[in-house]
Amino acid sequence: MAEPTVKINLSNPTEVARETLRRLAMRRIAPTPDNYQTLYDEIVGVPSAPANKATAETALAGLVSDLQEHHPALSAQVASLNKAIAKSDWRQCSWQLSEIAVQLKPQPVRPQAIEKTAPPQDDSLAQLRELLAKTLEFGVASQLTHNPRLVEQTQQLAVAVREAGTAAALLKAATGLKNLWVGIELQASDAHNQQETLKRILLLLVENIGELLDDDTWLRGQLDLVQEVVAGPIRIQSLQEAEKRLKEVIYKQGMVKHGLREATATLKATMTTFVSRLSDVLAANDEYQGKISIHVERIRGTEDVAELNSILESLLDETRSAQTDNRRAHDQLVHERDSALLAESRIQELENQLAQMSALVREDPLTHSLNRRGLDDEFAREASRADRYRAPFCIAVLDIDNFKMLNDKRGHKTGDEALIHLVKIAKEELRLTDHIARLGGEEFLIIMPNTPLDEAAKIITRLQRSLTKKYFLDNNEKVLITFSAGVAERAAGESQEASVGRADSAMYEAKHSGKNRVCVAPAATAEAG
C-alpha cells in the first residue's frame, strides 16, 4: 500500500518530525532511534548518516525540544521520552515514541474545516476588545473617581473600543488610549504634589502642637509617632500600623483619663469637706471659749455656793459637749484624711498608667526594641551623663547580612521573625545598662554607656558568636543569621548624628571586608561634633 503524499515544509523541524513519526506508523517500523534517523534523512533528502548512538540521541533530543515548544499538551509523554533518552533505554524510547506518534497522527484536512477555523479569530478579536473595554470601565475608571473628566474620557474610550470593527476604528481608539494615559500621568503628578503639600502641612501642625506640650506629657508620644510616619515614605502598612497603635493607646488613655478625672474630683471633694470640718471645729472652739469666759465672769461676781455649784455643772456640761464635738470632728477629719490619701494614691497610679501608655510609642511594634524616639531619648540621657562625669560612651550600628536574600527566599514573615530573634538574643546577651534600638529595616543601633571602645567591640563580637550558636529556626530548619557592625566611641560634646554616622561608616567597612565582622571607627575629629 502506497503512502499518501503529504506536503510539508522541510525547513520546519516540527513538521519533519511529525512526518517521520507518521511514516514509522504507516510502514509499521519499530520506532528505534536508528529507524527514526533513517526516515528523517529520507524526508529532508540528505544521505543517511551511519547509525550510531550519538546521532540518534542528537536527533531525539531535537525532537524533544520541538515537541516541548510546539506541543505542550504532550508534556508528560515528552518528559518520559527525555528520561529514557538520558538513560539510553531504547525499549522505553520506542514505546514513548509510539504513544507520541499515535497522538500526532494527522487527520484528513478538508476545506470545510479551514473555513470553520476562520470565525474563531474574529471571536477572539471581539473578546479582546470586550476585555479591554471592561478593563477601562471597571479597572481604570474606578481608580479615577476623584477626577470626573478622566472618568468620562475612560468610559467614552471603552465604548469606542467595544464598537471598533475596523482597523481604522481600532487605530483611533489607540490614539484615544494614549491621550488617556497622558492625562492619568499628569493627574498622578498633581496628586503626588497634593500629597507632599498635605504632608508638610500636617508636619507643621504636629510640630506646633508639640511646642505647646511638656516633654513628659502623654500626648507627645502620639505626636512623635504621627511625625515619624508622615516624615517617611507613605506606605499603607505603616499607616495601618500607626492607626492601630494610636487607636489602642487613645482607647486606654481615655479610660485612664476618665479614672483620673474621677479621682481628682474625689480628692477635691475630700479636701473641701476637710476644710469645712476644720472650720466647724474652729468655730466650735471659739463658741466654747466664749461660754467659758461667761462662766468665769459669773464665778467672779457671786459668793453664793449654790450658784457656784450651778455654774460648775453648766461648765462641766459645756466641756463634755465640746469634747464630744471635738471627738466627732477628729474622727471626721481622720476619715477625710484617709480618703484624701486614697484619692492621691489612685491619682498617682493613673498617672503612672498614663506614663506607660506614652512609653508605648517609644517602642518598635515588631521587635519591641526602642524606636527612633526611644533612641533619641536614651542617647540624649547617656550623652549628658557621659559629658557630666567624663565617662566613655560607645555605640554600635548593626546590619543583618544578606537580609534581602532571606526575604526573597523565605518570605517577609520569616524576615520579620529573624529581626525579632536578633533583638531577643541581643537583650539576653547585653548588659542591663545597654539598649538596642531599631534604626529601620534590618539596621539596629546599640547604646553602651560607661564603656571604652575596645570593650564595646568585644561586647558586639560576643553577640555575633552567640547569634551563630543560638540558631534561628524557620519551619524547624536551622537558618544562620549574621550581621556586620561598626563601633564608635562618642567624643565629648559630639552630636548624635555625627556619632551614628561614624559608626555607620565603620559598619559599611565591615560589609565590604567580608561581612560578619566588627570594625572600629576612627576617633572623632575636632569638627565632627
Image (tube, rainbow, N blue to C red):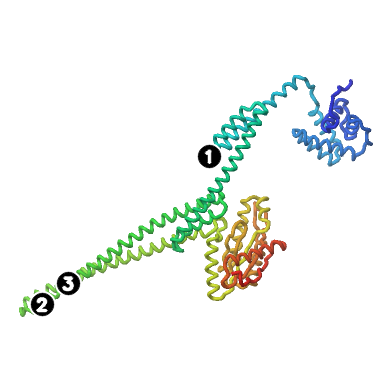
Secondary structure, mark 2, is helix
Residue 430's place in the image compared with 62, above or below, is: below
Task: Please name the residue that numbered disc 1 is placed on.
Answer: 147
**Screen quadrant of the C terminus:** bottom right
Residue 341's place in the image compared with 161, above or below, is: below
Q: Nearer the viewer, residue 320 or 186?
A: 186
**Screen quadrant of the N terminus:** top right
Please, what is the three-letter code of the amino acid marked with disc 1?
Asn
Mark linked to residue 297: 2
Q: Is residue 157 left or right of residue 250?
A: right
Q: In this view, does 282 lie to the left or right of 451?
A: left
Earlier sequence position, callout 2 versus callout 3: 3
Earlier sequence position, callout 3 versus callout 1: 1
Earlier sequence position, callout 2 versus callout 1: 1
Q: Residues within 10 Å of mark 1 (few under 14, many from 20)?
A: few
Task: Please name the residue that numbered disc 3 is placed on.
Answer: 288
Q: How crowded is mark 2: few (under 14 residues within 10 Å), some or many (20 or more)?
A: few
Give percent across and percent down for residue 514: 72, 62
Examine the image and state in which quarter residue 510 appears. bottom right
Give percent across and percent down for residue 173: 63, 32
Give percent across and percent down for residue 42: 91, 30
Give percent across and percent down for residue 516: 69, 62
